[in-house]
Amino acid sequence: MKNKSLEEIEELVKQGDLDAMCELAYRKFEGEGIEKDYKGAFELYKQASEKGSIKATYNLGNSYYYGDGTEQDLNEAFKLYEKASSKGNDNATYMLAICYYFGNGVDKNLDKAFNLFSVLAEKEQEDAEYYVSTMYYEGEGIEKNLEKSFEYMKKSAEKGYEKAYFWTGYKYLQGEGTEVNDKEAIKWLEKSVEVNDDMGQWLLGTLYLEGNENGIEIEKNTEYGVELLQKSAEQGNEKAKEELKKIKQ
């Protein structure tokens, strides 16, 4: 479907092709070769879902979850995710876990959230691995286990999940669930800075300000440290703001 022209897609939609409905809805949502139309995308996903498309059911759930093209309705989103998940849609399973984790559209249930995230983590899904790590770290829905937390966070980071970069670096720096490794810590913190992560900017900036004063193998670079802290503070990071205040005193 991706390679078909807009005219071809629209003709297939007229014929009731469910994949074409989903593709046209996607293009309307993204404004890809056509004017952005969230309401139009919503209607197409709704039609395709009613005709049995699981992909459309998942995307319809997203429309309700985020309020795109319709009023936000977390309860309806949850029901749709549950339906699509039961038919094997992993994206819907992930969002179902998110709903249970945050209590969106359903009573908060960390046990169910952990179980669902774990199913996806076993399939090497990096965003699920991130949450499994977080839940092991906090002891949410599962007994606290720092080694498991590190294992899943690193897996997530290695797959390119940007939120995991900072925490992988932090765990190496603190020796949480693994041995302290300054070189690996700095490597992952630098990767977090590359994706404009405010926590990475704060921590790496602080490390460059201190240099090896605290036994960390890093060459002091005050100018770069301040630059990173300023970038972090501009994103609203309170820790970075505090560090900058100390410098000015």
Image (cartoon, rainbow, N blue to C red):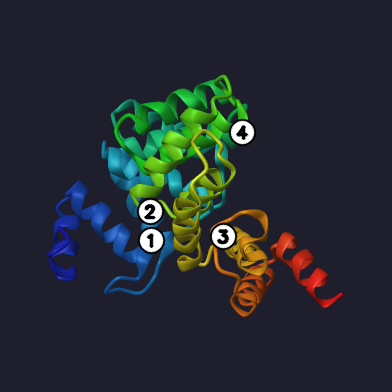
Q: Amino acid at mark 4?
A: Gly
Whether residue 105 is visible to the viewer of this picture, yes or no, is: no
Q: Amino acid at mark 3?
A: Gly
Mark 4 lies on a secondary structure that is loop
Mark 3 lies on a secondary structure that is helix
Q: Tell me, yes or no, whether the two marked residues, 4 and 2, touch with CB atoms within 8 Å.
A: no
Residue to which mark 2 is pinned: 43
Q: Amino acid at mark 1?
A: Gly
Image mark count: 4
Taking 178 as reference, is 237 above or below it? below
Residue to which mark 1 is pinned: 40
The N terminus, quarter of image: bottom left
User: In x, y percent, where is residue 223?
Assistant: 63, 80
- Specify which label sits upstream in the sequence, 2 or 3: 2
Q: Choose between 186 and 113: the one closer to the eye.
A: 186
Q: Nearer the viewer, mark 3 or mark 1?
A: 3
- Specify which label sits upstream in the sequence, 4 or 3: 4
Residue to which mark 4 is pinned: 103
Whether residue 197 is visible to the viewer of this picture, yes or no, is: yes
> Which image quadrant for residue 95?
top left
Residue drawn at (54%, 36%) of the image:
134
Residue to which mark 3 is pinned: 200
Horizontal relation, residue 133 to residue 27: left or right? right
- Specify which label sits upstream in the sequence, 3 or 1: 1
Horizontal relation, residue 185 to residue 208: left or right? left
Q: Nearer the viewer, mark 2 or mark 3?
A: 3
Taking 138 as reference, is 180 above or below it? below
Q: Amino acid at mark 2?
A: Glu
Distance between the alpha carbons at the discs numbered 1 and 4:
29 Å
Taking 23 as reference, is 243 above or below it? below
